Image (tube, rainbow, N blue to C red):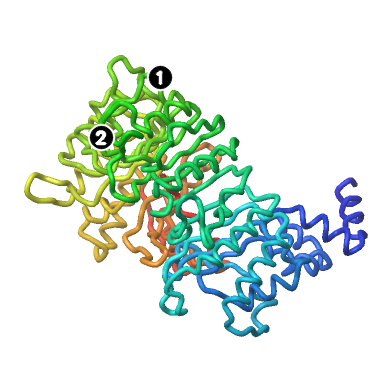
Amino acid sequence: MAPQSVRQSLSSLPHEILDDILSELDEVNDLLSLAFTSRRNANVIIPQHTQYRNIRIRTPMPAMWAHLAQRADLTRNIRRVELCTRQDHTASDRFPFTLVYGSTHHEDEKQRVDDICTALGHMKRLATFVWDYEPDVKSGRWRLNHSHEEMIISSLVKAPSLRHLMLRGECGAHVRDGKGTLRQPYPLWNITGLNSLSLLGTAWTNRSNSEDIIRLLQASPNLEYLEIPMELRGLETCRLPRLKKVGLPMTSGAATTNVSGELGVVADPVIGFLQSNPSVEELNWSPTLTMGLPNDALPNLRCLSGNYAVIRRLEMPGTTPRPIECLDLWDVASDRLHVLPTFDACTLRKLRIGHVCSPVSLYAIAEKFAGITWLRLPAKCMHRFFSSAFELPRLLDILTCFTNLEVFRGPALWEAVGGETQKERMHDAILDLVERCPRLRQLDHSSSSVKRKAVKLIKIYRKEAPDGKVEQVWYEIHRPPSGRPEMRADRRYLSINRSGSMLIREFRDLPTPVISQSIL
């Protein structure tokens, strides 16, 4: 009775009140679920709300910005804006196409920037802003107009709900001594209250801007995610009590030094920064030096991505093994992993191995890190003078040793069967692997999308009988996300009869919903 009463009450609300209620919903999926409950709700929600939550574009689109500048009633509900490079196809473009496609607008860059600023001023609920600027030859924009850049960032300063900010490419490249065009302070320094910040590019390694960047960080004491060049001077002075995820890429190619310019001394700014922020749980860092971290640094570290040098920094005498759950070491050979005393062998769940010199070392890894559920191997074994694919029986035997394996990534299995052309042999290998690894649910396919930088996924499903025994197993080959409402998959069913043998039935072109690719 209660649900019907609520439904009647919602349907009887005036349009203005219902619109205000819908404006509080952040997720498009929640809006669509509500839209399916009645025709009236659908008319109110689609497209006035569903197309005004997330904006992601790769081209200038002056007509869209003119529309957003004029329709404050719709623009106020936008939560996320991404201005990407034309070459970035990793996700689909999103914009209010229903009301924009019929409009026209002249290519006036100054007017377009004014419209962007006006639209950003309407976005009272804007939480995320991403801007990655690179020269766009096709549109004739060879360089970023930094006066326009500062106008846009000044509009962000006034956004009351902004919590996540990412600037990449040429953004900030003109700033010197903390000042931008006309020698006025760069407006970015006035942004406060962020929860995540990513500044990537050579602009943020300029020493004359270091003090202003440090003040920017200190103005957001609730930062939980930070991605910033490791060359930033004064980084060791930042103390962010809620910081959880840190990325420290090398941007300029210079080795990390202390404030006096000495190379390889204990006062490394990054070491000081990590020691001052014990709350860090995820770290992506590839240092150039191997000076060790203090024993009490990074007590809460759970996920580590980097190179062998970062392992050497963690290997201090008397250090308690760290409860690492995710490990991605791109230049560490497999024969070194199982002898590292740095990690607690019982906690590791995800492992990406950069090099395999000997398949035998993988047996030792499987024995030591028995809890691994996610594994990625390179395509081939790297011998001293040559490389070769894994032998299929040996690879299947190795994977069998990972008794808790759920996800196996990388092209190693395809290389072992002879490449993409050996699909029938690959099918037999999958069948064998499913029997050997009862928990396995996902593999990488051989095909990939260069634009989307993603590979097809082989997803494995099992149907259990009432007595708990598996009676049917099948896998689906999912294409990379295309942004369409649905995609197609190739399915193969492996029906298990009473005698235990598998009968293969094959079905093609069955619609399945879009899925997201798993990452380490």
Nearer the observer, 218 or 31? 218
User: What's the residue type where badge 2 is placed?
Assistant: Leu
Can the viewer see residue 256? yes
Nearer the observer, 447 or 255? 255
Of helix, strand and loop, which one carries label 1?
Answer: loop
Nearer the observer, 459 or 197? 197
Q: Position of residue 422 (x, y in %)?
A: 24, 63
- Image quadrant holding the C terminus, namely top left
The residue to which callout 1 is attached is 296
Residue 12, placed above or below residue 403: below
**Position of residue 461 in the picture relative to residue 74 (left or right):** left
Q: Extreme top residue here?
A: 318
Q: Residue at x 48, y 61 (%)?
A: 132
Q: Mark 1, residues whose alpha carbon is within 10 Å: few (<14), some, or many (≥20)? A: few
Q: Position of residue 7 (x, y in %)?
A: 87, 54
Q: Extreme left residue here?
A: 385
Q: CA distance from mark 2 to mark 1?
A: 23 Å
Q: Which mark is residue 216?
A: none
User: What's the residue type where badge 1 is placed?
Assistant: Asp
The residue to which callout 2 is attached is 263
